[in-house]
Amino acid sequence: MNKIMITGLAALGLTLSAWVMALPTPSGEPILWISGAISETNSDSVAAFDEAMVSQLPQATINTNNHVVESVLEYQGPTLESVLELVGAKGESVKVVAWDDYVVSIPVADITKYQVLLATHEAGERMSIDDKGPFFVVFPFADHPELRNDYYYSLSVWQVKEIIVE
Ligand SMILES: Nc1nc2c(c(=O)[nH]1)N[C@H]1C(S)=C(S)[C@@H](COP(=O)(O)O)O[C@H]1N2
Ligand SMILES: [Mo]
């Protein structure tokens, strides 16, 4: 980006971070859909993501075990908070829908407090849909023993397909 463009953006009242964080349009097959109380969309009232868009989001990691995997493994992916920020989510909770039609509501307060991941990778491997992929909601159980109860286990959705901001 050259100086004239940057000056132009500033004149338009846009910040560089808004420019960088704008929601792109998927060029590949969508693998995640976000709808509901969001301000940024890329196809009728939905924010759709393909694999490339997800991998370009800032990545975070959580080392933890959980109710399904006994050993502590590294989970990697964008934080749910950053994904919600990107789509301009304005809501108190998000309804997470899985490919097996499992649905649960996660409070945004928990998503922020625990920096919950929308994990794509487990121990460096892309999780596939016949395992816990394409997305697994990961809470930091290892660092926060208070999460080790059936309520937070029930929020640990695997095979995530869709998020509806409420
Ligand atoms: N996709 C999906 N995720 C899910 C579920 C489900 O049925 N489908 N069950 C949830 C509930 S209610 C709990 S308690 C745990 C259950 O995990 P387990 O049956 O392997 O102990 O995963 C959660 N994540
Ligand atoms: Mo459960």
Image (cartoon, rainbow, N blue to C red):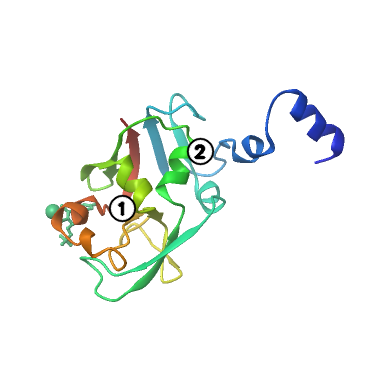
Q: Residue at x 38, y 31 (%)?
A: 35
Q: Residue at x 50, y 29 (%)?
A: 40
Q: Position of residue 108 (x, y in %)?
A: 33, 40
For the point 40% across and 47% down, which residue is it?
80
Residue 111 versus residue 65: which sits nearer the camera? 111
- State the image coordinates of residue 164 (x, y, percent, origin top left): 33, 34
Residue 86: image tag = 2
Of callouts 1 and 2, which one flags the residue occurring earlier in the amino acid sequence? 2
The percent position of residue 126, horizontal first and vertical second, equals 44, 63
Task: Find residue 99 and report its horizontal and vertical position in percent.
Answer: 28, 47
Closer mark to the observer between disc 1 and disc 2: 2
Whether residue 58 is situated above or below residue 38 in the rendered picture: below
Q: CA distance from mark 1 to mark 2?
A: 21 Å
Q: Quadrant of residue 10?
A: top right
Quick check: 136 left or right of 19? left
Instruction: Name the element at disc 2.
Output: helix
At label 2, the amino acid type is Leu
125 left or right, relative to 138: right
Q: Residues within 10 Å of mark 2 (few under 14, many from 20)?
A: many
Q: Is residue 6 above or below residue 148?
A: above
In the picture, which quadrant includes the N terminus?
top right
Q: Nearer the viewer, residue 29 or 105?
A: 105
From the image, tell me which residue sits under label 1.
159
